[in-house]
Amino acid sequence: PREGYGQTWAKTILIGEHSVVYGHPALALPLHELKMQAWAAPAAPDETPRLHALDYDGPLEQSGERFGGLRRAVEVTLKFLGHSGQGFHIRTVSDFPAGRGLGSSAAASGAVVRALLDAYQVDASQEDILNLTNEAEKITHGHPSGLDAATTAGEQPVELSAGNMRSVQPHGAGYLVIADTGVAGSTKEAVEGVRSRLQADPDGVGQLLDSLGQEAQEAIGDLEEGQMEPLGEHMNQAQDLLNALQIGHPQLDHLVEAARSEGALGAKLTGGGLGGCMLALAADEESADRISQALKDSGAKQVWAHQLVA
Ligand code: PMV
């Protein structure tokens, strides 16, 4: 094998997080301005395979629980290739932070799968690549929906609804502004919290989830038709519902308010909640710039702008 290279991207959930767990639709978009890159270099027989990722630089096998998914990606891909005996030095470089709902784990696993396939110059099908990535995601997330794996590797936004995925063609001149609160929110904790509140109050919480699904359904239609103002309105409604599900955070609310005061058409948390990132919809580039500045002034750790239709 030669040294292989693979690339994926960050993702953000436009709408439908949490209710998607109960079969309602959600839409995620790849953020092509935020790359995840991976290199896989063959290790000599007497060398210990190493991993260089985030702040870790050491033996791959000793890289700990944090990189369990990534090690699994290496293992299943080499097995798929029929080269389980060959060791590889793996290096990843990311343009975006881990643990903020931007899909860093799926993006890293997907990039590593691609780098290993490239090392052997094997052209696998998209389906095989996604299956290998999802094997890795099972280690990281337990029951991945597959939305992150598909979106971080894709060209187009992806809708997931009742377990089915389809790619969506957005229209309209809008921009998304994504901001990191800097607060680490655990998606697992958030999902478990919603589940226990649903058990305690099936009617009330069930109603919130149904309404969230309805907002997502309509928002996805608006995105396809380029209806930016109604799309923003659905995002605002979704934010209220997500707060009612108790997965908000004061810093998320603070940034959402800052974006709306600066003219955002809509603003909400994105991903698991309890911290992590928020996103705002801006009508045009100038508005996106103003909103970005307001978010930075309000304490966002990092801000990125993404044109809906490039
Ligand atoms: O935190 P993220 O970006 O991985 O998003 C989680 C989305 C949820 O709907 C809350 C959970 C899920 O598995 O779909």
Image (cartoon, helix red, strand yellow):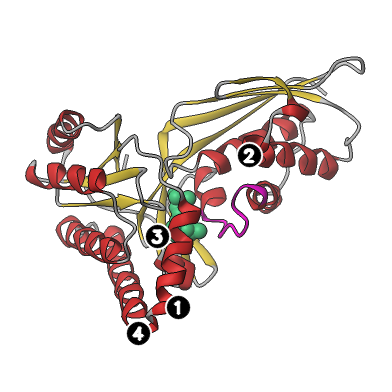
Specify the amino acid type for callout 4.
Asp
Q: Tell me whether circle 1 and circle 3 mark residues in contact (CB < 8 Å).
A: no
Q: Residues within 10 Å of mark 2 (few under 14, many from 20)?
A: many
What secondary structure is found at the residue carrying circle 1? helix
User: What's the CA distance linking mark 3 and mark 4?
Assistant: 19 Å
Q: Which residue is mark 4?
A: 203
Q: Tell me whether circle 4 and circle 1 mark residues in contact (CB < 8 Å).
A: no
User: What's the CA distance linking mark 1 and mark 3?
Assistant: 19 Å
Mark 3 Cβ inside 8 Å of ligand 1: yes
Quarter of the figure that contains the N terminus: top right
User: What's the CA distance linking mark 4 and mark 1?
Assistant: 9 Å
Q: Which residues are magenta?
A: 139-147
The disc label shown at residue 17, or none: 3
User: What's the CA distance linking mark 2 and mark 3?
Assistant: 22 Å
Q: Tell me whether circle 2 and circle 3 mark residues in contact (CB < 8 Å).
A: no
Q: Residues within 10 Å of mark 4 (few under 14, many from 20)?
A: few
Q: Is residue 222 visible?
A: no
Question: What residue sits 62% from the left and 47% below the top?
Answer: 140
Q: Which residue is mark 1?
A: 199
User: Which numbered disc flags the more N-terminal residue, 1 or 3?
Assistant: 3
Q: Is residue 36 visible?
A: yes
Specify the amino acid type for callout 1.
Gln
User: Which numbered disc flags the more N-terminal residue, 4 or 2?
Assistant: 2
User: Which numbered disc flags the more N-terminal residue, 3 or 4?
Assistant: 3
Depicted 87 relative to depicted 229: above or below: above
What secondary structure is found at the residue carrying circle 2? helix
Specify the amino acid type for callout 2.
Ser
Q: Tell me whether circle 3 and circle 4 mark residues in contact (CB < 8 Å).
A: no
